[in-house]
Amino acid sequence: MKSYLIIMALSLTVSVLPAQELSVTGPDQHLKVQVSLKDGKPVYRVSYKDKTVLEDSPLGLVSNAGDFSQGLTCVEHKEGRIDKSYVQDRIKQSNIRYQANELTCTFANPDKQKIDVIFRVSNNDIAFRYVMPRYGETGSCVIEKEATGFDFPSYTTTFLTPQSDAMIGWKRTKPSYEEEYRADAPLYERSQYGHGYTFPCLFRIGDDGWVLVSETGVDSHYCASHLSDATADGLYTLAFPMPEENNGNGTVAPGLALPGCTPWRTLTVGETLKPIVETTVLWDVVEPLYETEHNYRFGRGTWSWILWQDGSINYDDQVKYVDLAAAMGYEYVLIDNWWDTNIGRDRIKSLVEYAHNKQVDVFLWYSSSGYWNDIEQGPVNCMDNPIVRKREMKWLRSLGVKGIKVDFFGGDKQETMRLYEAILSDADDNGLMVIFHGCTLPRGWERMYPNYVGSEAVLASENLIFNQHFDDNEAFNACLHPFIRNAVGCMEFGGVLLNKRHNRTNDGGTVRKTTDIFQLATAVLFQNPIQNFAITPNNLTDVPAFEIDFLKQVPTTWDETLFIDGYPGKYCVLARRHGDRWYVAGVNAGKEPLKLKVSLPMIAGKKATVYDDDKKRNPRMSETVVKADGEMQLVIQPEGGVIVAAR
């Protein structure tokens, strides 16, 4: 991870004259933000190609150092340009050039205290945040609330997932970003629990386009946020965590050292879904928080727990999954909860040695622990205390363990953001990568933390084992994630389930409704730099050999991602490139075959391997040559998939 070119031209224009309205557009002039004061209250509105995306929406915040939401005057503004290039190895694209125009509006309240609102606008993305200086002797403050809002036109429909009640669910571990989505819901529909909606939030502005709203740059200096329910006028406002989160421990309002700034709020805007799927704004506006001396290796892993469950966390079964990883040529095996008691620390050492002899590295599971839930799964009480955590990580390093999966966090308060950051920082000191489960949404973390490799923060594969309802809706959910959850960050889903039945012996439990090719397609469709696949040892012999060969070759990091076609909850076709090899992956949530004519100019004239389903939804593989114009006909069977692999 490195930046190879940074050019910033700022403060090209500075004005101290009061302005009735200020505006900034993206480089191609289509996306426009206009900022003004309405009776002393700052507002902004957004248009794309002269069509309204957001109506007048509030800006500002209230702190114990001053009120910056009303009674304001605009005392200065600056304009500038940003042209930045960087390399990032864990997101949807490896080489990124970010070009944006910047507008800084300086407002003053009646006490002459100032606050800056900074907007950065690229061709399809907006990022904005507040920057507060030191106010005389006041060197810190508490942000009591933000006025920040998003006021959509009345004809907007939504694709949202609700913020759950706090301290409910398994062992009182929610909220954990694992609620169900509603697709194309009315703008004013109240959320399931009455607490609003978790980021990211997707909106369809009638026939005029799409908007994805999220935030980035959240670290130990602030809390994570979400959206409130909409008012009758279609206004969503930024909401802080609920007091009950973390079992009531920690403050709702974040504390900020001065000078200081809030996280970036982001909007991605497009006439089509292409900018939504391909956006990199979540990483464009943040920077690495620390350098690392380690070279982290990404790749694939096996994982017994997902289908063999708690009973598999024993030495002999883990040997089977090490052997499976070795047979597949995978880099990792993930050993899940209870290893400290069911295997024991002494035998874990010999198990890690066994894995290393098979050229397989190890991830170990931990509870986040602490005073905010009722989790019993061990190891517990190792990650929340810095003294114990550092000792534990030093021991892991001595074994040659390469990473940890930390599970069951307590909410979105600033206190929990500090814990995420502390775990990541201490882990990097010991050469450990980190996966989070039962957790919050990552907010720019792939760029901010060099050893961060993914978060769950989604209704993931474990639910397919627990309840048939989620199998019945698997295809629907898979056709949402590329447009929403996975569009803004790595998604540790734990997919590719090739058993027909979701139990150890492939003869009981819930029933998979999707085809094998659908499952293989999700290996490309879902992006995470370390993919812990849900394959089992029996799959080496009970599925067609070409499926196993595909899974032996599929990469987990990508140099380029392109949106081809789709609609949230209905179908999705993406293309991803790793080196010189392209993978076009599509899935269909419908109950009828889907016939698509797609344009694939990047593989025009090339030989390709096609994986798809026949009319009986049985898997098949064929070879073809893509036409010289790149046009291709795809047929995706109901709850089925297609993959076109070419180089």
Image (cartoon, rainbow, N blue to C red):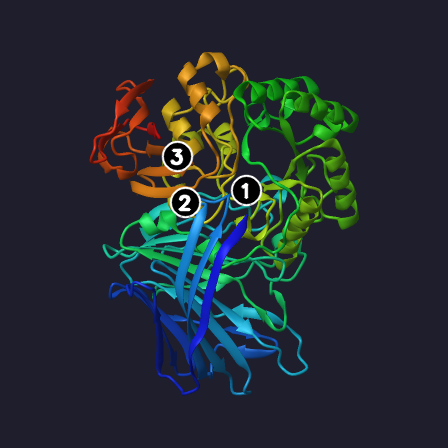
Above or below — where is 115 with respect to 528? below
Q: Which mark is residue 454?
A: 1
Viewer-nearest residue: 596 or 501: 596
State if disc 2 and disc 3 touch (CB < 8 Å): no
Residue 313: name its quadrant. Answer: top right
In the rendered structure, the answer to whether residue 234 lies left or right of residue 331 reads left
Q: What secondary structure is marked by label 3?
A: loop
Q: Considering only order in the chain, which callout, 1 or 3, is on the residue closer to the N terminus? A: 1
Front tag of 3 and 1: 3
Report the residue that reaches farthest toward the top. Answer: 541
Specify the amino acid type for callout 2.
Tyr
Percent x, y of residue 326: 58, 20
- The correct choice, above or below, for 443 with respect to 369 in the image is below
**Residue type of the residue flagged with mark 1:** Gly
Dot 3 alpha-carbon crowd within 10 angstroms: few under 14, some 14 to 19, many 20 or more: few
Residue 138 drawn at (x, y percent): 66, 79
Q: Position of residue 370 (x, y in %)?
A: 71, 47
Amino acid tagged 3: Asp
Q: Residue beneath label 3, please?
A: 580
For image coordinates 64% across by 48% down, the residue present is 292
Q: Secondary structure at mark 2?
A: loop
Of labels 3 and 2, earlier in sequence is: 2
Could you tell me if residue 443 is visible in this image?
Answer: no
The one of 225 and 642 positioned closer to us in this rendering: 642
Q: Classify mark 1: residues with Cα within 10 Å, few (<14), some (14-19) or many (20+).
A: many
Q: Are marks 3 and 1 in contact (CB under 8 Å)?
A: no
- The residue to which callout 2 is attached is 181
